Amino acid sequence: MLDILLVDDDPMIRESIADALLDAGHTVTQASDGEQAASLSKARVFDVAVCDVHMPKMDGLTLFRRLRRDSPSTAVVIMTSFGRIPDVIGTLRDGAVDYVTKPFDPTDFAKKVIGSIDERKSLRKTFDRARTNATEKRTGTPLVGDSSSLRRLADRIKTLADVETSILITGETGTGKELAARILHAESARRNGPFVVIPCASLPDLMVEAELRELSELRAGNQRDAWFRSAEGGTLVLQEVGALAPCAQASLLRILRDPQVRARRSRQWQPLGVRVVATTTVDLSERVAAGTFQDGLYYQLKGVGVHVPPLRERDGDLLLLVEHFLHELSVPGVSPPQLAPDAWAELQRRTFVGNVRELRWTIEHALSLTSGAEIGLEHLPEPWSAYA
């Protein structure tokens, strides 16, 4: 509920509005003129100030400007007659949240106008509290969230950071598998080495097969460099490893089983010096059962696994992620717009089959459409058509 400063020189109007606000559960402090209201606002910060325009000693427009200067967190609602509406329009441009024209129904005013402000302030407090909690309970990684499933992921990454065997990262589309791989690399002893990502699903099968075959056949004297060479001393990520063609799978299996190569212009054998991290959206066990993925490679990869949970299993993280993307995607140095209650309610209803990637796209889309200080329901895009 809100702490409200009500300013009007007409005691009857003031009492009727105060009664409606009190019935709605708010606290109300009354002032009969602008100077008294200004004095009260110096001693205490109000959530909302409801100000009449025409008052003795200090009019409502002057009071509004003073409140904006001395108490910027106070939301201001202007009460006016029809004849003063042009004067009030300027206050909306300068930060007033709303205005009402007299006469109006006090109960309707308390429910709609003040109720809307209450919703927005409650949502802002929720976002601020969530951000504070996230700061106090960091996972120690760039992972954003504080759900138990995300904390388990962070712990798993820390445990496996310096494991030298290949690692398989599983998870639905858009969950952040590459981010998990980057954190594995950053927390390992290989952090100063290269981090190379090979998008297996988007490269021609013949190219992938040729690159892997060249490295796996170095014993036969082939001295050409390959992707593994570019990642030497670091991490090589095979993105969507399930998309590899059968011949490429066979070459990769040979490399993982015997990760040694002959150095250039040398007869000496040496370790390949690359840790392989593979990611997959599909269930590789199903591919093995269907005969499209080699069982030997599957077991070689799945020995050490990391699972990135979908957004629906990360209770409480949606709020933190929205706040994170609002700040990340907004213009640097400019406070990001707030999220209107109806927009937040809509985000909570969505399934986000595209997970964190879809959520990020949604916030980016909304920011590109809003030109004000708030993101409303009308700024949100339709869910991804591929998943709707």
Image: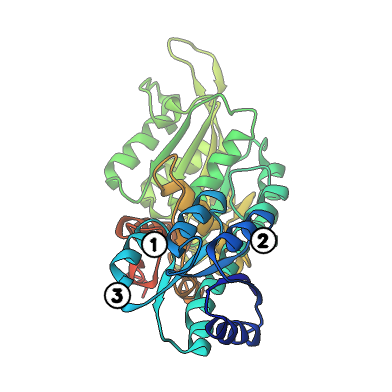
Q: Vertical placement of 182 versus 7: above or below?
A: above
Residue 241 lies, in percent from the top left, at 44, 50
What mark, if any, has residue 362 been given in the picture? Answer: 1
Task: Indicate the secondary structure of the residue bearing disc 2.
Answer: loop
Q: Amino acid at mark 3?
A: Gly
- Look at the image and tell me whether residue 322 can be seen: yes
Q: Outermost residue, top direction?
A: 265
Q: CA distance from mark 1 to mark 3?
A: 42 Å
Label 2 vs 3, first from the N-terminus: 3
Q: Tell me if 63 is positioned left or right of 373 in this view.
A: right
Tag 2–tag 1 contact (CB < 8 Å) = no
Q: Position of residue 196 (x, y in %)?
A: 44, 34
Foreground pick, 382 / 224: 382
Q: How far apart are the alpha carbons under marks 2 and 3?
A: 54 Å
Question: Foreground: 343 or 159?
Answer: 343
Q: Which amino acid, by three-letter code, is at mark 2?
A: Ser
The label number, if any, that marks residue 83 in the structure image: 3
Residue assigned mark 2: 147
